Image (tube, helix red, strand yellow):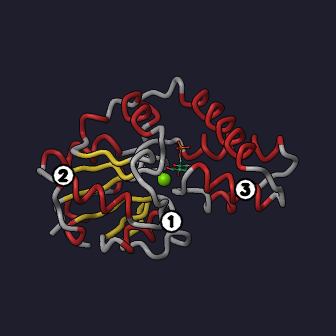
Amino acid sequence: EINACLFDLDGVLVDTAIYHYKAWRRLANELGFDFTEKDNEKLKGISRIQSLKLILEWGGIKKTSKEIEELSQKKNDWYLEMIADIQPNELLPGSREFLQELKDHGIKIALGSASKNAIIILDKTNIRHFFDAIVDGNMVQASKPDPEVFLIGAKLLNIQPQQCVVIEDAVAGVEAALAGNMKVIGIGDKGVLKEANLVVASLAEMSIDQLNSL
Ligand code: BG6
Ligand code: MG
């Protein structure tokens, strides 16, 4: 039986994955190289600093830790500019409706996001009140695919991992959920999110019945 739903944020509830991608590409371009949408899949779900380290590796560029700190700050400034005017209409299809359906059925809701900007986005898109627990990038030590972010969420909700389902758009996030002994629903492409228990194109396809059939 499923008693809790743990949501990733970027690319699951809100259409912000594209802004992360744009800001990282801008940084790479400024450093003199580019990366593809396929490479970008590897950046989804992991922390800001880990993303940057991976990108620098792709570009064959070495930086000191001070420079890395400055570059990650630069990317975040661009990202914050991009999301400054984000509105509830940038919620992905079905997000709000599915959160409401879970609430109506008494299923606990948590956020499990790698982002340090999660609260800003929940506020601007008007969905913060749905969450019984919020775990974001400011609260975890280990990045997905480590299950820490979801295990803390389950603990805060006081629900066993086996009774939790995670909703994720990132390969690292799917792996984190499975490592935490949770069920996982992928949002996106079946070919990419191979390990998920179920993959749907968007939350608009989700229902309570589907949760219980996992
Ligand atoms: C994840 C995104 O949710 O958060 C990653 O999938 C992002 O792309 C990570 O890098 C960290 O986000 P932030 O907002 O702390 O830079
Ligand atoms: Mg995501």
- Amino acid found under the numbered disc labelled 2: Lys
Quadrant of the drawing holding the N terminus: bottom left
Distance Cα–Cα, label 3 vs label 1? 16 Å
x then y, percent, for residue 41? 61, 60
x then y, percent, for residue 29? 82, 44
Residue 108 is marked as 2
Callout 1 secondary element:
helix
37 or 161: nearer the viewer: 161
Quadrant of the drawing holding the C terminus: bottom left
- Amino acid found under the numbered disc labelled 3: Ile
186 or 142: nearer the viewer: 142
Q: What crowding class fits label 2: few (fewer than 14 Cα within 10 Å), some (14-19), or many (20 or more)?
A: many
Question: Nearer the N terminus, badge 3 or badge 1?
Answer: 3
Callout 2 secondary element:
strand
User: Hey, which quadrant is residue 200 in on the image?
Assistant: bottom left
Distance Cα–Cα, label 2 vs label 3? 36 Å
Give the residue displayed 17% in from the left and 45% down from the top: 103
* Number of numbered discs: 3
